[in-house]
Image (cartoon, rainbow, N blue to C red):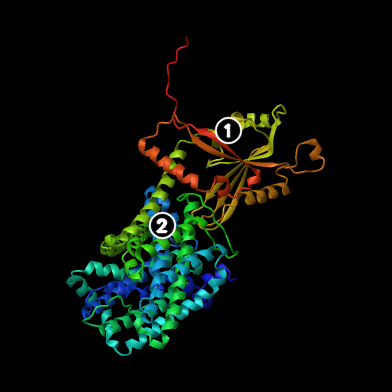
Amino acid sequence: MLTDKRVHKLSAAGLLISLGIIYGDIGTSPLYVFKAIIGNRLITSELVLGSLSCIFWTLTLQTTVKYILITLQADNKGEGGIFSLYSLVRRKGKWLVIPAMIGGAALLADGIITPTITVSSAIEGLEIKYQGLPTIPVVLIIITGIFFIQQYGTSIVGKTFGPVMWLWFTMLAILGLTFIIRAPEVFKAINPYYAYHLLTTSPEALIILGGVFLCTTGAEALYSDLGHCGRSNIRISWIYVKTCLLLNYFGQGIWLMTQEGTRLNDKNPFYHLMPDWFLYYGIGVATLAAIIASQALISGSFTLIAEAVRLNLWPKVRINYPTIQKGQLYVPSMNLILWLGCITVIFLFRRSTYMEAAYGLSITIAMLMTTILVSIYLRLKKVPGYLVVLFLLTYGLIELTFFIGNLAKIFHGGWFALTVGCVLFFIMWSWSKGRKIKNKYVRFVDLENYYSIIRELSSDISVPKYASQLVYLTSAKFSSELESTIIYSILQKQPKRADVYWLVHVDVLDQPYGRHYKVIPLISGKLIRIDFKLGFRIEQRISHLFRLVVQELVKSKEVDIISQYQSLRKHHIIGDFRFVVLQKVLSRSNTLSIMERFIVACYNTLKHFSLSEEKGFGLDLSFVTVEKVPLIVSKTEEVNLIRL
């Protein structure tokens, strides 16, 4: 397997890998873009040339300039995506979590529609040969198969992605060229006048823009997959990809102009570029490209959720690592959600023509959120203020125009994407807000005040020993303080005598990768704190990491973990370890506002369905005790009670 540096470095292998991973979404857009733009409108040369001009300048301004040249600069230690971008800028303002959550929710909503529209568009090409062919069962089987194989990992399939997508893009270019050589004057559509003329004279200009926007829907994926291939490989491979896409779009434009004065009537211009003998081969390659596009988006959704979990923007969920390949992960709950969403889209809209009406709205929102966060990033990097304002106004205006154009889709299917996005945003918002409400009322105490009693308790043989090594997870950022609930658990709920008390704190870094730790001996040989600093893409296997640190401390003779029981100590038997996980229960005497009660109720509901804290931190369950402790959020009201 290629190392990260070799993949990220400009190379033939890196370019091929980037073709397979990065461009699945934007690369399959020729399957449905012109079909969405033309719809049932009368085909005219003004409509075709204006649409081609819009496509050319959208790919140039939106994809090339904004994403390839500007946004790819905002890499977080080589990683991209809206949550990586948020990690870079979040210290500039707490409000930045809102555009990050909106963008993340919109991208996940897009992950439900993209596989269905792409696969449906590919399979519907068979209708040219077999009119009335029921394509829905075929689409259902392919979609279900894609989601089924996720649990086994896709590293084997992934090795074929690059060559297949190279074949796909080359096919796009050749098909387009076979028509362009007949009418090379079509390139006059590069002149922005044709786009301007169409948008200023057509009464349906905004609706047409909604279709045009579909040519750049995969631009966000370019940035999200930055960590897989590296900036140089993406930028160079984009030259080839964009050339192939434009050749195909211009080829479709020439075919459409041969149909001037007629209507499409559900015909797909893409398949009419193919000679009759090539149709089956073309549909086969298109189907493979559609599967790859779906796979890339599903994998991207898994990565997005994993990042959200570690940034505390999503409930803890099970994350599996089916292969040893770096970055390869599988989120069962999200896989199920995406599959159910795709099945719903198939039965709800049935054909790609109707799916197009639901597609694009959520991505315009995601792009707007990225524009906001990139503006903050550029300011952070000391880019002159007037250039930042120019970037924000230019792309804010472009994306708002696309958003308004896509608003017409709300009543034709866009409501579905919007509803899914709103539900996903609400989950993120209520989880994040609920955690903050509960954490706001967590009380911390000065740990130094308890040093002597902890030392005495550890030596008090009149108290039954609870564990040789007792471990607590703490959220206290400073070693000088500790949650009152942990002190309550050790001293009051059930006095817990141990030979050594351990405090473990996990800090999620703003960078994607990194495993560091720091040991702070608070009471020599009795109370030790370990601070782990982990990247937001690192699996939090705390039991394993804790064991490694303890082994290092034993080697350096900083701690003694041999059992203190005389019968065991003489045989050098290691003492038992016990993790205590505290579940903080809100007191019924709290005085939360109505809104706070609602948020906490939503948070508790999500927590009920989420992964438990001990599983989320990767603790060995055979060494874990879960203990409920009260979280007092307000002082009890004084009551005048009279003794009779």
* x 38%, y 78%: residue: 125
Residue under pointer 1: 487
- Residue 477 drawn at (x, y percent): 52, 42
Element on which disc 2 rests: helix
Q: Is residue 381 visible?
A: no
Q: Is residue 288 above or below residue 626?
A: below
Horizontal relation, residue 474 to residue 265: left or right? right
* x 52%, y 72%: residue: 9
Horizontal relation, residue 215 to residue 513: left or right? left
* 3D distance between C-alphas at marks 2 and 1: 38 Å
The label nearer to you, 2 versus 1, is 2
Q: Residue furthest bottom?
A: 182
Q: What amino acid does circle 2 point to? A: Gly
Q: Which sits earlier in the primary sequence, circle 2 or circle 1?
A: 2
The number of numbered discs placed on residues in the rendered structure image is 2
Quarter where residue 519 is shown? top right
Residue under pointer 2: 104
Quarter where residue 238 is shown? bottom left
Q: Residues within 10 Å of mark 1 (few under 14, many from 20)?
A: some
Q: Is residue 49 above or below residue 329?
A: below
* x 32%, y 67%: residue: 354
Q: What amino acid does circle 1 point to? A: Ile
- Residue 342 drawn at (x, y percent): 42, 63
Q: Which quadrant: the N terminus? A: bottom right
Q: Is residue 532 above or below residue 250?
A: above
Q: Residue furthest top?
A: 644
The label shown at residue 245 is: none
- Residue 223 drawn at (x, y percent): 43, 65
Closer to the camera, 131 or 404? 131
Closer to the camera, 189 or 209? 209
